[in-house]
Image (tube, helix red, strand yellow):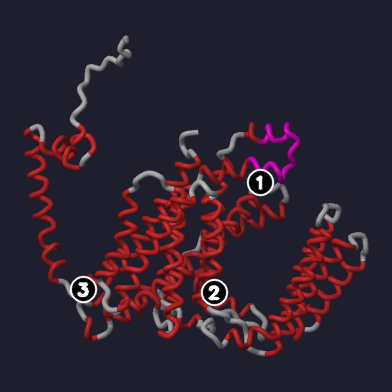
Amino acid sequence: MPQPAQTPSTDALPPPTERFTLLGWVYKNLLTPWYNLLLTVVSLWLVYVLLKGTISWALTARWEVIPANARILMVGSYPAEYLWRVWAAIWLLAAIVGFSWGVWVSKRERVAWVLMAVPVVLALVSHGWVRLAWAATLALALAGWWLGRRARARKGGVWATLLWVLYLPTFVLLVRGWGLPEEPFWKYTTAVQLAVIVASLIAAAWAPRVPWVALGHAALLAAALALPQWRSVLLWPAIVGFLVWFIARRYAHLEGLKRLALQVGLAYIPLLIFIFFAYEPLSRTWLAKVASANWGGLLLNILIAVFGIMFSFPLGVLFALGRRSSLPVIRLFSILYIEFVRGVPFITILFMAQIMFPILLPPDMSIDRVVRAIMGVIMFAAAYMAENVRGGLQAIPKGQYEAAAALGLNATQTMLLIILPQALRNVIPVLVGQFIGLLKDTTLVTIVGLLDILGVAQSVLSNPKWIGTQREVYLFVAFLFWVLSYGMSYASRRLEQALGVGRR
């Protein structure tokens, strides 16, 4: 039998142990030839000389300050009886991260070892039941990864996406609890407001040509403006109800809208029962509200960053589109907002959110100071987000618009289906860089009186017992922020690889 032809090769491959092991790589790149060995020895000696003092300090540092104050650094003054809710949120996050990793990552990645090392390091610097809690975090992450590997071929990506979508409201529910107001008047106010919106949807679906619905919304708006005592009750349902009616009226011809309106109306009945009867016993159980004054530490930084990213991104996209709009009023408003916000320091926006917002609100309305800080972060980040997105929009060639027009797409369809996906894909590195900067900028909220992780660290260092441990505390804080920033950067690179940024 004739032998199969072999591809000629003049380069002899090294043994498999040198090609696929760490030892082979070290021998080939660091030990041979003789000058590589000499450079390796000299480099190691220089590193030792430069880091000798640091290593000596690290071995004798007072690292006990970290486990002794781990709880306050992580969650601030969060009530001890509800700490299990924070741990439940961490365990759920670990399981989702592991499941997503098993579904979406098939190759070996070095970042996996970094992520696994985080709970290990935190367990080593902890003591007691906290060490077991971090061990459980690692175990749940590995269990989630095992499940994700087996669900990869069974729509695992859909399940992973759904889990991430549901995690945020679950996290807020666990950390904050059922924080609805306890005044009885709130129940009637909420029932009236939801009734206006539901009635607007039903009227648009079943009677789209009846003009008195718009007149009814106008009357509610006039009553809200003329009667200050009813403004908080009627103002926003009149506006939202009119928008719901106007949008649903335009699509009243679609099949299924009437059925949807009836389903929403029927769903309003059990919701009404819950508002009037079920809230009171539930709010006094294990899901009782934890006031934002008790939020602090790294938990507060993460909350502000997550909500800032979630809401500044769509707002920045809208301002970017508004700046390129052909309508002069929208374009001028977008330009003024972007240039004004980008022209002042971030701390100015925070002070304005904390001091000016309460002054501008009606006397009977107040906004929590954490919410005010989140609003300031959103305002500031949205302006920079708009400019980043506008750069991506300007990079799209004119031929894309012409091709969409040739296909018969209108301006809205062209922007949403053709232009905007390409623009956002092109600016992924810039957007993620801004998200990382936003995460680190959340430490500035300590200037306006919120005890984030830096504020808590300062309070720890003011304790006479821990005087002189500044380097240990701030190194630990830097390690936490590095882990979060590195995780976002890695997710960005994975997304770029999946979307082919820079290759196609």
- Give amino acid for label 2: Leu
> Crowding near pointer 1: few (<14 within 10 Å), some, many (20+)?
few
Question: Mark 3: which secondary structure?
Answer: loop
Residues under numbered marks 3 and 1 in contact, where contact means CB atoms less than 8 Å apart:
no
Whichever of labels 3 and 1 marks the residue nearer the N terminus, that label is 3
- Look at discs 1 and 2 and give the one toward the viewer: 2
Instruction: Say if 350 sits above or below 34 in the image.
Output: below
Q: Which residue is mark 2?
A: 173
Is residue 352 among what the camera can see? no
Instruction: Say if 140 sits above or below 409 in the image.
Output: below
- Look at discs 3 and 1 and give the one toward the viewer: 3
- Left or right? Give the position of 102 relative to 73: right
**Depth order, front residue of 342/191:** 191
- Residue in view at x 48 percent, y 48 percent: 152
Q: Main secondary structure of the magenta part?
A: helix
Q: Which residue is mark 1?
A: 416
**Depth order, front residue of 396/188:** 188
Whichever of labels 1 and 2 marks the residue nearer the N terminus, that label is 2
Question: Where is the N terminus found, in terms of image quarters?
Answer: top left
Q: Position of residue 88 (x, y in %)?
A: 45, 72
Residues under numbered marks 2 and 3 in contact, where contact means CB atoms less than 8 Å apart:
no
- Residue in view at x 40 percent, y 60 percent: 143
Q: CA distance from mark 1 to mark 2?
A: 32 Å
